[in-house]
Amino acid sequence: MDPEIKSLLTQVSTATLSLQLLKRGIRRVAMAGVKPLVGDQGRLVGPAYTLRFLPLREDLADPAVLAVLGYGPRRVIEEAPADSVLVIEARGVTSAGVVGDILAARLKYRGVAALVTDGAVRDGSGVAATGLPVWCAGSAAPASLGEHVGGDLQVAVGCGNVTVIPDDIIVADGDGVVVVPAALAADVAAAAIDQERFEAWVQQQVEAGRKTLGLYPPDAATQAEYDAWRGRPEDGQT
C-alpha cells in the first residue's frame, strides 16, 4: 500500500470517509454490526486479504479437515501478508468463532495488521490479550466447524453487508469499519483531509455560538470566509 495514502487515511475518521464515498455515489461502505473487540484500538488502515466461510455442510465439516494443509482457514493464517487486514466473511453468524486466541497470536506474530469479520471470535479475552486489533460482531465459545465450512482465499467477500475485494483499503476505528475501493483511495484520502480541516473550523464557529444554517453545509459566503481563513499563514492557525 502506498505509504502516503496510508498516512492520510490514518488521520481521518471512518465517518469522514463514508461521507466522501457517498459524494462519489458509493453508499454501502460501512460494515453493519462490526465493532472493536476491545476499546481504544485506535485507527487501523491496510489492504484487505480475504477469506470466505461457507454455511455448514456436515460431510465437509469433519474436524480432521483442520489438519489438511490446503484448508483455507488454516492457510490464511500463514499466507495473509504483513500489514494486511484479514477480512473474513462469516455471513453475520455469531454463534461460532472464526478465529481463536492461538490463531490470533500467530497473525500478530506474523505482522498482520488486524482482523475484521462479521462473525464472532472464540476465546475473546485471549484474542484481546494477543494485542491483535480485532473488529468483529461478538464472541462465542463454539469452533467454526459448528456453523461454517472454510471457503476460498483472496476472492470478493461480503462482510457486514459490504462487498470487499482483495486489496480494497480497510479503515477501522472506534465507530467501525469502512471499505475504500483501492482505485479511489488517493482521491478520497486527500478530500477527507480537506473535509476534516473544514469541519474543525466549523466546530470552532459553532462553539462560538454561530448557527449551522448556511455554515454546514456552507453557502457561498461561508465558503468564501473559510477560503480566506485557509489562506492565512500556517493554514489559518496564526
Image (spheres, helix red, strand yellow):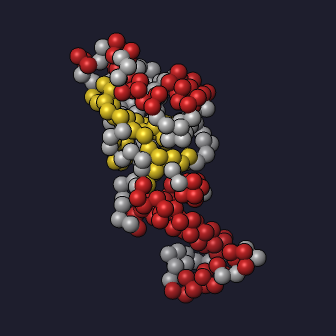
Q: Nearer the viewer, residue 108 or 230?
A: 108
Residue drawn at point x = 24 percent, y = 22 percent: 57
Q: Nearer the viewer, residue 215 or 229?
A: 229
Q: Is residue 51 above or below residue 63?
A: below
Q: Residue furthest top?
A: 64
In the figure, is residue 11 to the left or right of 79?
right
Q: Nearer the viewer, residue 136 or 185?
A: 185
Q: Is residue 127 visible?
A: no
Instruction: For the C terminus, give its image quadrant.
Output: bottom right
Residue 225 point in image, percent of width and height = 61, 84
In the figure, is residue 220 to the left or right of 150?
right
Residue drawn at point x = 45 percent, y = 31 percent: 79
Residue drawn at point x = 61 percent, y = 45 percent: 42
All told, the count of numbered labels is 0
Residue 109 point in image, percent of width and height = 58, 29
Q: Residue furthest right?
A: 238
Q: Is residue 206 above or below residue 52?
A: below
Q: Is residue 55 visible?
A: yes
Residue drawn at point x = 73 percent, y = 79 percent: 233
Residue 6 point in image, percent of width and height = 55, 54
Residue 5 point in image, percent of width and height = 54, 57
The quadrant where residue 149 appears: top left
The quadrant where residue 12 appears: bottom right
Q: Is residue 138 above or below residue 17?
A: above
